Image (tube, rainbow, N blue to C red):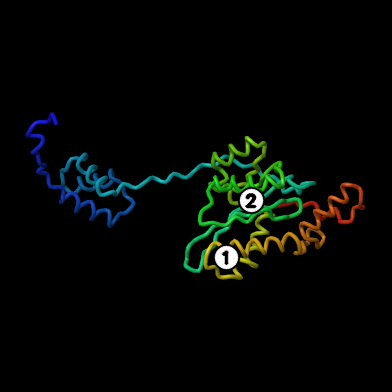
Amino acid sequence: MNISKSVYYYKSIKDDSPVIEKLIELTRKHTKRGCDKLYDQIRQEGLIWNYKRVRRVYVALKLNLKRQVKKRLPARVKQPIIIPDSINGCWSMDFMSDALCNGRKIRILNILDDYNREILAIETSTSIPSVSVVRTLEEIISWRGKPQKIRVDNGPEFTSLIFADWCKENGIEIQYIQPGKPVQNALIERFNRTFRGEVLDAYIFEDLNQVRGIAQEWMEDYNEERPHESLGSLSPNKFKALALLVDSGKLEKSFPQSTRNYNSNN
């Protein structure tokens, strides 16, 4: 092996048990203090252990904590909610959280077309990263077409490079709301309240398949039958069909203009 006998038979005679005991004692009292602070405190107590030794034992005990750095977001410009004049003008997206009966946390991604308040997808899973968000959007686009822009909050799934690059490649504008201002995404927030009251709070779910089944059935009823006040008491799909007839000239305009504009003063 090309090593000397002295190296082969060498055994360290260093006893790190005093250092281990002292570090454990200090970290029990001060769980957030790092190695440098602990070493200074050790020296103040008169112990003259070498810093490298203290650091080596500190890392071996896996006491080093990962520093959490707050992600700084760029300044967001407040933009009023303007209802588009046609489908796919603007979509809104947001996440919700809930739990199964066994306590397991789940996440729900809701995607809404602002034009006729039609819910395009209710994606449910234990985790929905940016890759899953993009995959869900691609599935919707395959049968509905691309939106001109998407309104979202500043969650990590929406500020990630995966989502931003995908939108850029597809020519989709991302409209971020200002941090801490969910009212700027009022359409999807209002839908979330309805969904929580009529589905999430109304049932006790045993597994994800049960959540998905009930959500899919409820979404179909919401789009097809449930009256919407801002749409003249029409369901999203009925309003869309009526608007298409008006645009084609086969039917005179029969809904008030006020129902097509929504301006947030907050």
Q: Nearer the viewer, mark 2 or mark 1?
A: 1
Q: Which residue is mark 1?
A: 210
Against 14, is 206 above or below?
Answer: below
| Callout 2 amino acid | Met
Q: Where on the picture, by quarter, is residue 97?
A: bottom right
Return the residue nearer the eye: 245 or 157: 245
Which is nearer the N-term, disc 2 or disc 1?
2
Image location of residue 67, percent across then percent down: 39, 45
The span from disc 2 to disc 1 (Cα, nearest Å) is 23 Å
Q: Which numbered circle lies on residue 149?
A: none
| Callout 1 amino acid | Gln
Q: Which residue is mark 2?
A: 93
For image coordinates 59% across by 51% down, the residue present is 180
Image location of residue 68, percent across then percent down: 42, 46
Q: Which quadrant of the figure contains the N terminus?
A: top left
Return the residue nearer the eye: 173 or 210: 210
